[in-house]
Amino acid sequence: MSWFNKAVSTFIDKVPPSTIAVFAKRYIAGDSIEDAVKVSKRLNAEGAMTTIDVLGEFVENREETEYYRDLAIKVLEEIDKTGINANLSLKLTQMGLKLSKELCLDNVEKILKRAKELGNFVRIDMEDSSCTTDTIEIYDSFRETYNVGTVLQAYMRRTINDIHFLSDKPMNFRLCKGIYDEPRAIAYKDYDIVNDNYKYCLETLMKKKAYVGIATHDEKLVFHAERLIREYDLKKDEYEFQMLLGVDEELRHIIIDNGHRIRIYVPFGKDWLPYSIRRLKENPNIIKSAMKGYLK
């Protein structure tokens, strides 16, 4: 890790929100659903699909979970109304996972039912390790009834076992590296090992005929994924690449020009600060990129 990246990761929590906003705004669609739809339309025109995420993870009562549940349903209805090529990403902590698993299941099922009525898809995001087992179990309980997927994180030591555990039925996963600060006992810390495990998990998923959202900004992993796509003779509707809004747009266009489908993660909402801090810790080069943009 360079001195710059280490400094950003160490001190970002102490930076005023107004300063973080300067660097984060290109990576967030805005405050409203309308902002997310506008960004999705632009990305669709460039040849990319999107997944829309409502920012905000920590709820304190049932009423807040119902607010986020209804907002998620509204996102699905706006996607249908506007005709954009988009689906929904969903956090279980918004749905009340930390309050009551029963409450969370009820909220999620209401969203999944509406998505099914509208012919759309819901991706259940993976959060920190305290949520991993519940997230896997909730995905498993719904995947035969609804059009739903979840996320696997390559830095988690358990991930390859989760793949084998879930391979008795059709699987739909976003495979990413992982961004939460987890203990070494449960997560790989070495960059090369994380990348090697990403490759191992990706090839295992392809062997098992899973639908995979190949979520990475690492061109080495994109190269490896393209090799596997050719090796397993995957059709264009059997996988997709995924990237974050505003990150390495040149690589995004390269992937599109190479004939692959790609989906961009489009977050919106007023609760943008925790998301932005995590992303800046994960990829401090975002600050360098933003500074270059301002200096042009």
Image (spheres, rainbow, N blue to C red):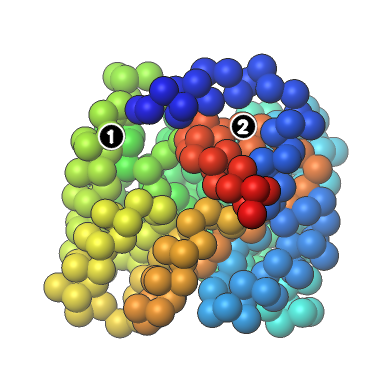
Q: Specify whether residue 198 is in view.
A: yes
Residue that label 1 marks: 191
Position of residue 230 measured from the top left corner of the image (x, y, whole percent): 19, 75
Amino acid of disc 2? Ile
Residue at image mark 2: 277
Mark 2 neighbour class, 10 Å CA radius: few under 14, some 14 to 19, many 20 or more: many
Write the residue at 69% across / 75% down: 41
Q: Residue at x 61, y 32 (%)?
A: 277
Relative to the observer, which residue lies in front, 107 or 55?
Answer: 55
163 lies left or right of 196:
right
Q: Mark number for residue 212?
A: none
Rendering coords of residue 98 (x, y %):
63, 29
- In the displayed structure, 207 sits above or below 81; it is above
The residue closer to the viewer here, 20 or 148, is: 20
Quadrant for the N terminus in the image: top left
- In terms of sequence position, does the residue under pointer 1 or pointer 2 come before the other? 1
Question: In the image, 68: left or right of 2?
Answer: right
Q: As shown in the figure, which amino acid type bears the numbered disc 1?
A: Tyr
The picture quadrant where one finds residue 63 is: top right
Q: Residues within 10 Å of mark 1 (few under 14, many from 20)?
A: few
Nearer the observer, 253 or 263: 253
Query: In front here: 43 or 171?
Result: 43
CA–CA distance in space, label 1 to label 2: 20 Å
Q: Is residue 247 left or right of residue 110?
A: left
Question: Where is 186 relative to 268, above or below?
Answer: above
